[in-house]
Amino acid sequence: MEAFLDNLYGTWFFPDRTFRSLREEAPIWQAAIITIALNALDVGRRSGFGIFSLVQWVSIGLLGWVILGALLRGLAFSFGRDPRFDSVLVLIAFGALPWAFVAPAQALGGPLGALFGLAALVWFLAWELWAIAIALKISWWRIVWLLPLTFAAGFVAIAWAVSTFKAIASLG
């Protein structure tokens, strides 16, 4: 438990050193706890803490965490890197810790809540990009550059898929 609290503290106040340490150690159970807790907090913020909703969305959150990790590992492979999958998962989870401040910021309401919420989101994005860059051993600015390219590639892939299905449908 002490190592877990040290990793939480380090992520918030000494992220570079902590992220590098987490890449080597990769305590997957700690990352799973963070992922479950952040998803549960988000479900509670959005729709209350109904048990069915909680189980459903936390399960989807865990699945999304694993899929994101696999996609990032694939991205790293395209850069000639081969990070350990558990390290990628751990760094994604710990990089997401600032998300815990979104719900309290929204609970404040008004302009102050919106300002704190925006600050939490910026903090979340910065830490997530930093963690991913360390996980993949790629500079953070390359990760930032890849984000718009990723969305553009997604739109192109969807357009190609739709066109392909239309062409197949028109054959019959």
Image (spheres, grey):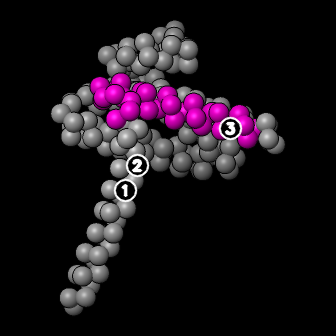
Residue 70 in view in this figure: no
Residue 3 vs 64, above or below: the answer is: above
Highlighted range, magenta: 113-142
Q: Position of residue 35 (x, y in %)?
A: 50, 34
The residue where tag 2 is placed is: 148
Q: How far apart are marks 3 and 1 (CA)?
A: 27 Å
Q: Distance between the residues labelled 3 and 2?
A: 23 Å
Of callouts 3 and 1, the N-terminal one: 3
**Which one is closest to the eye, mark 3 or mark 1?**
1
What residue occupies the far left of the structure in this picture?
80
Q: Nearer the viewer, residue 31 or 119?
A: 119
- Residue 158 painted magenta: no
Q: Main secondary structure of the magenta part?
A: helix
Circles 2 and 1: CB atoms closer than 8 Å: yes
Circles 3 and 1: CB atoms closer than 8 Å: no
Q: What number is the disc on residue 117?
A: 3
Q: What element carries label 2?
A: helix
Q: Residue at x 37, y 62 (%)?
A: 155
- Residue 132 painted magenta: yes
What residue occupies the far bottom of the structure in this picture?
172
- Label 3 crowding class (10 Å Cα cut-off): few <14, some 14-19, many 20+? many
